[in-house]
Amino acid sequence: MRGDALCRIDDLSVCYATGDAPALQNVSLTIRQGQRLAIIGESGSGKSTLGRAIVGLLPGNARVSGDISWSRDSGLFHGRPLPGRDIGTIFQDTGATLNPVLTIGEQVAEGAVRHLGLSWRQARDLARGLLERVRLPHPSHLLATYPHQLSGGQGQRG
């Protein structure tokens, strides 16, 4: 991998069923450290498939060709990033991704408990700090709320 590239995608194609048109076809791009990348397109154009491929969350029926390679020189992680610890995706429909029976605090803290080995109390403090960092109002109150109590924008930031 050349330069300060964090991730390089070369000729990536994804199909979900034999004979179906590809959900992605021949996608190539480079993501550099510190760079922001926006994926824009019409409904059904493959944005979510690309996001899932990048974070390693494609379903078992996905047939993939091409290559996604990660820099080992970044110091961020070793080899492929671990979803939920090193990399994540925020999908537009948070109602389909947030668990409706768990509070926002439980859902934000869960990753810290699972991947960082923090206690629930430490993870809850970290979750409060993360909600402050994304400028959500009243982060202590939001920790005890449920996904249906948030606006769409709040859900995406939470």
Image: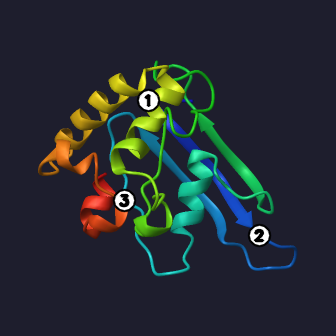
Which secondary structure lies at badge 2? Answer: loop
Residue located at (21% from left, 46% from top):
134
The amino acid beneath tag 2 is Tyr
Seen as rendered, the residue at the extreme right is: 18
Q: In this view, does 35 lie above or below 57?
A: above
Q: Earlier in the sequence, mark 1 or mark 2?
A: 2
Which is closer to the viewer, label 3 or label 2?
A: 2
User: How many C-alpha atoms fall within 10 Å of the one at disc 1: few (<14), some, or many (≥20)?
Assistant: many
Mark 1, secondary structure of its residue: helix
As drawn, is 96 to the left or to the right of 17? Answer: left
Alpha carbon of mark 1 to alpha carbon of mark 2: how far? 32 Å
Residue 65, picture quadrant: bottom right
Q: As displayed, is residue 142 above or below residue 6?
A: below
Q: Mark 3 points at which residue?
A: 38
Q: Nearer the viewer, residue 91 or 146?
A: 146
Viewer-closest of 87 and 5: 87
**Residue 61 point in image, percent of width and height:** 80, 63
Quadrant in which the N terminus is drawn? top right
The image's mark for residue 16 is 2
Q: Mark 1 points at which residue?
A: 112
Q: Where is residue 90 in the image (x, y as percent from the top left)?
A: 42, 56
